Amino acid sequence: MKAVRIHEHGSEEVLVWEEVSLPEVKDDQVLVEIKAAAINHLDIWVRKGIPGISLPMIIGSDGAGVVAEVGKGVDKFNIGDEVIINPLLFCGTCSSCLDSQENQCSSMGILGETTNGTNCEFIALNQRSLNKKPTNISFESAASFPLAGQTSYQMLINRAMLKKSDIVFIWGASSGVGSFGLQIAKSYDCKVIATGGSKEKCEYASKLGADLSLNHYKDDIVSKVKDFTKGKGVNLIFEHSGFETWSTSMKILSRYGRLVTCGSTTGPKVSIDLRYIFFKQQSILGSTMGTLSALDGIMNLISDGAVTPVIDKVFPMENIADAHKYIENSNQFGKVVLVP
Ligand SMILES: [Zn+2]
């Protein structure tokens, strides 16, 4: 079979579409023929070099496909089943997993980072890593949401306990997690304020349902949020930027407000005035990846049509270098998908 592998870290040139041996299928594993995979920024970081990655590695976290072979101990899938791959690796037996907190598994990992990933023609996975694909979701769409959609669902629903009455503030609504976060909040009928870094990105946020779209480089966010919320501030902030957005977030968060964060792309060190946190009784919630329930949750919202994964462009997998270049050099809206 063929796969996208890196043998060293670096620019797009280190991505090689090459012949590798077909993975051996263990008793509890399912061999999936990949029909579509998607690119996340994690893939770019893995390519450039994250500590602890063993090389060579097949990259890619998201994928969907068809069951091609099942091991002797597999009881949930049959050859021909259409499946969505969960990028979260978990043991299924530790206390966190038994408590349905798979994203806190003591041996948690991510496909394409801690082990070979989805940018390939076939992948062997434990059956607990697979979900049956609803028939009304295409392979391209199915491959485009697991990592980002599951992360957003975990943040808003499982961690921040999203309520219909919340006014939700989404930073960077054109990002993968941001666009899912915005749509999840709208599917709960919340009022949503979303930001983008350009006129086009603000228009995109409005198209996804934002009630107010703000340019986070140009607009006076604090005063616009005050106007929109009649001085109360927002109840829930969806944050993945860190340093550059933090002080504004602290100024616009309401009494009893929750801020949920899954990343710090502009820097991890921020300052907090604890007087505001305790006096306003605010909560800061960390979140990473998502539980099985989060993947089910976002999959159901998509299958019901309440959330729509946006696909910007589809590349043949062999043109992986062009696809990475495209992501790094352009302001794409939505996911870049790969097909073998
Ligand atoms: Zn576990």
Image: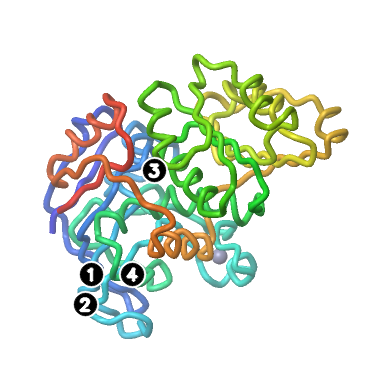
Q: Quadrant of residue 205?
A: top left
Left or right: 229 with respect to 128?
Answer: right
Ligand 1 resides in the quarter of the picture at bottom right
Q: Residue at x 50, y 62 (%)?
A: 297
Which quadrant: the N terminus? bottom left
Q: CA distance from mark 2 to mark 4?
A: 14 Å
What residue does disc 2 label?
80
24, 314: nearer the viewer:
314
What residue does disc 3 label?
53
Q: Amino acid at mark 2?
A: Gly
Q: Amino acid at mark 3?
A: Ile
- Element assignment for label 4: loop
Left or right: 313 with respect to 310?
Answer: left
What residue does disc 4 label?
134
Of badges 4 and 3, the one in the foreground is 4
Q: CA distance from mark 3 to mark 2?
A: 33 Å
Q: Quadrant of residue 312?
A: top left
Q: CA distance from mark 1 to mark 3?
A: 28 Å
